[in-house]
Image: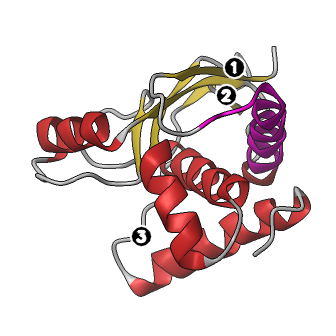
């Protein structure tokens, strides 16, 4: 098994091409390699602002739309944690190779943000996807230091994939 992307487009406001899904699969592989994760599955859903607003309200108690939500499957609590590792017979940690989690992106919000930031929709969607993936693997941005770490990692992956500003 390798890193697998299972995706759906549950909105009709922004066109998501099949070709772009290949870019997302490459981003997943690059981000996974950067984190030492070579196996597992990520589910990605593109939704509209109304849907992500409701999810943000239901799961985060925040009554407004957002651009991306991540729901890690390897967490033991509501707090974001490092990826859980299994241990083989020799007590060496090996990465978990099951479901890493779900990433939900508002394609509608991504389009608006790409226009605001002056870069392509593909770059914005790629950024949000890598950002969501890093959340699945335990990264957060609650303070300046952790935000700087995430930003460096995101930009490095996007640069490798040619999705620059």
Q: Which residues are magenta?
A: 15-33
Q: Which residue is mark 3?
A: 141
> Disc 2 versus disc 3: distance between alpha carbons?
32 Å
Is 60 rendered above or below residue 40?
below
Residue at 23 percent across and 36 percent down: it is: 55
Q: Are marks 2 and 1 in contact (CB under 8 Å)?
A: yes
Asked if residue 131 lies in the magenta stretch, the reply is no
Q: Is residue 32 visible?
A: yes
Q: Quadrant of residue 140?
A: bottom left
> Disc 3 versus disc 1: distance between alpha carbons?
32 Å
Single out the residue that lies furthest toward the bottom: 144
Q: Quadrant of residue 133?
A: top right
Residue at 72 percent across and 70 percent down: it is: 155
Q: Quadrant of residue 89?
A: top right
> Disc 2 versus disc 1: distance between alpha carbons?
5 Å
Q: Which residue is mark 2?
A: 91
Identify the mark at residue 88; answer none if there is no mark. Answer: 1
């Amino acid at each position: 098994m390798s890193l697998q992307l299972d995706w759906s487009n549950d909105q009709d406001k922004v066109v998501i091409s099949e070709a772009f899904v290949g870019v997302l699969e490459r981003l997943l592989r690059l981000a996974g390699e950067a984190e030492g994760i070579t196996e597992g599955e990520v589910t990605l859903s593109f939704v509209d602002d109304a849907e992500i607003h409701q999810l943000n309200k239901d799961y985060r108690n925040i009554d407004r739309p957002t651009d991306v939500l991540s729901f890690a499957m390897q967490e033991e609590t509501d707090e974001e944690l490092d990826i859980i590792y299994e241990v083989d017979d020799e007590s060496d940690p090996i990465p978990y190779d099951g479901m890493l989690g779900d990433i939900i992106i508002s394609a509608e919000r991504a389009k608006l943000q790409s226009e605001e930031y002056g870069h392509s929709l593909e770059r914005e969607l790629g950024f949000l996807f890598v950002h969501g993936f890093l959340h699945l693997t335990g990264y957060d941005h609650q303070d300046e230091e952790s935000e700087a770490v995430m930003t460096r990692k995101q930009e490095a992956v996007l640069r490798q994939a040619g999705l620059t500003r």
